[in-house]
Amino acid sequence: MADHPSSPSTSSSAKATAHTASIFGKQAVLEAFAGHPAVSSLEHLLIDAKWDRQELTLSVAPQAILDAARALKAAGYNFLEDVTAVDWYPTDTPSAPRFQVNYSILSHSRKERVRIITRVLGDNPRLDSMTALWPAANFYEREVFDLFGIHFAGHPHLTRIMLPDDWNGHPLRKDYPVEGYR
């Protein structure tokens, strides 16, 4: 389990509510998790952060996703556990990011995981590939590409993994027709 506000370094009033408390916002998480290796290593890259349901989620800009992954790996988070995406269609404004890409990264030595998220725009969504840093990202990124249409720059073989090569569209997008394209 992650170090959280109920760790010995916090006050007794924080200890009483730590298991039910949620912390939202970059500054609040930075204060509550001062000295935590994941938070400390990404402090300069953070856009937003939260501690909710005993899970630490750190948001970074799309152009900083590789730097964030490298910083976490250097801080002892040694295993890319999962990559997935969420389609937030329809967005509030046309300029709002449509897709959220989630990376679950595990530290075996600390016995904890951290979620890094980034948001990308809906038209021509692109991110840097993590396959050079974590080879396990290969199939996860291919799945996200296949089902959501998010391209991963620098991926060694970004092709469909679940659907036929001639499939039209990306079926986990919320604007994909329920019965497919006809």
Image: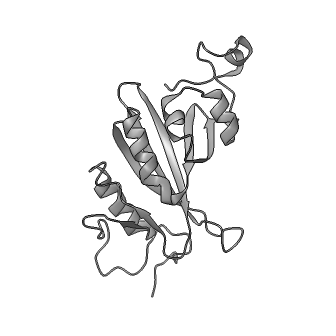
Q: Position of residue 181 (x, y in %)?
A: 46, 84
Q: For the view shown, which residue lies furthest in the right direction? A: 13
Position above or below: 21 against 178: above
Residue appearing at x 52%, y 50% in the figure: 117
Q: Position of residue 127 (x, y in %)?
A: 44, 63
Residue appearing at x 25%, y 67% in the figure: 157
Position above or below: 36 against 143: above
Asked if residue 98 lies left or right of residue 144, the reply is right
Residue appearing at x 63%, y 34% in the figure: 30
Asked if residue 17 lies left or right of residue 117, the reply is right
Asked if residue 167 lies left or right of residue 3, the reply is left
For the residue pair 66 and 16, the one nearer the viewer reads as 66
Q: Position of residue 9 (x, y in %)?
A: 61, 14
Residue appearing at x 55%, y 47% in the figure: 45
Locate the C terminus and report the quarter of the image it occupies. bottom left
The mark total stands at 0
Position above or below: 40 against 143: above
